[in-house]
Image (cartoon, grey):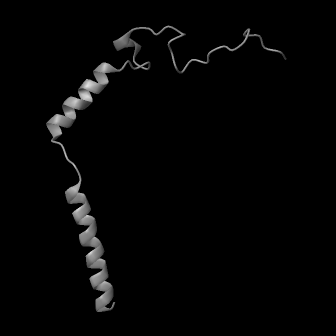
Amino acid sequence: MTTEMRLQRQLEHNKKLREQYERDRISVSEASILLIQFCQARRDMFLPTVWGEVDKKEDPFEIQPTGCGCTVM
């Protein structure tokens, strides 16, 4: 490997490290609090034991009937 190639690799690596250093960061405790708040504020349809049974009209995963609801075979 030539010296120029090594220098180019080192410069690229240095550039990536600078980009990572400049990225915004938050502490783990703050991220944990935000995650807990997010989970408590949104209703999870897959956890009826926690949130209670979901009405079929409110369930986004239930196939909603369109039209008259008739099926022709």
> Height in image: 45 above or below 30?
above
Give coordinates of residue 62: x percent, y percent: 57, 17
Residue lying farthest to the bottom in this orientation: 2
Location of the N terminus by quadrant is bottom left
Q: Which residue sits at x=30%, y=73%? A: 12
Q: Which residue sits at x=28%, y=91%? A: 3
Give coordinates of residue 55: x percent, y percent: 50, 7
Location of the C terminus by quadrant is top right
> Height in image: 7 above or below 28?
below
Give coordinates of residue 33: x percent, y percent: 19, 30
> Height in image: 17 above or below 40?
below
The image shows a total of numbered marks equal to 0
Quadrant of residue 47 within the rendered picture: top left
Q: Is residue 24 left or right of residue 48?
A: left
23 or 42, which lies in front?
A: 23
Quadrant of residue 2 within the rendered picture: bottom left
Q: Is residue 56 left or right of residue 14?
A: right
Quadrant of residue 68 within the rendered picture: top right
Q: Which residue sits at x=31%, y=20%? A: 41
Q: Which residue sits at x=22%, y=49%? A: 24
